[in-house]
Image (cartoon, rainbow, N blue to C red):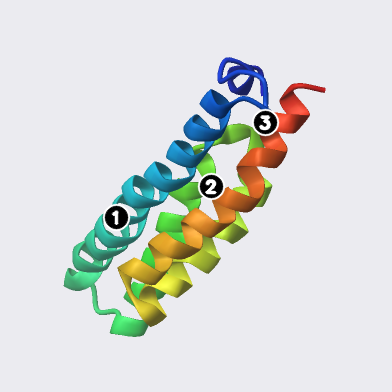
Amino acid sequence: MYLLRGIGDPGTLKTKFYTALLIIQSGFIEEPMFRLFAIAGLVESLGSLSMSRAHRLTAGLIGSSLLFGSVPPHNFLLSLPVGILLGLTYLQLGLVPAIVAHCVANAVQLPLLIRMAWQ
């Protein structure tokens, strides 16, 4: 929370700009990293084992979600289910809907965190 205070007073234009930037950039950076590369990498690396594709996808989803959940260590219990939902979105609908869902989740969460940091 202390790091969010460095952005500035929640009511300023500068804070709103940085908040919007954080909301957008994390979806565009984290989703390809955790969904596209992590899931695909895990699925491919498990390809030599005698596992069905469905089992490899499940293992990839769980592995990428655990990685996603561990990035903010103070929020693992919240980030893990979000990572699973975003991973399912990626597997069912593709990368672009997962990026949009990530940005929407950040748009809801980040302004609340900034306000909490200033209280």
Residue nearest the viewer, comparing 88 with 22: 22
Mark 1 and mark 3: span between their CA atoms? 26 Å
Residue at image point 61% right, 60% down = 81
Is 34 situated left or right of 74 in this image? left
Q: Which mark is residue 32?
A: 1
Q: Are marks 2 and 1 in contact (CB under 8 Å)?
A: no
* Residue where numbered disc 2 is placed: 69
* Residue where numbered disc 3 is placed: 114
Task: From the top left corner, tell me how far across and down residue 51 is, in percent.
Answer: 29, 79
Secondary element at tag 1? helix
Residue at image point 41% right, 66% down = 98
Amino acid residing under circle 1: Pro
Q: Split into 4 quadrants, where in the image is the N terminus?
A: top right
Earlier along the polypeptide chain: callout 1 or callout 3? 1
Residue nearest the viewer, comparing 2 with 59: 2
Vertical relation: 78 (above or below) 22: below
Mark 3 and mark 2: span between their CA atoms? 20 Å
Secondary element at tag 3? helix
Looking at this rendering, what residue extends furthest in the front direction?
Answer: 13
Residue at image point 36% right, 53% down = 34
Secondary element at tag 2? helix
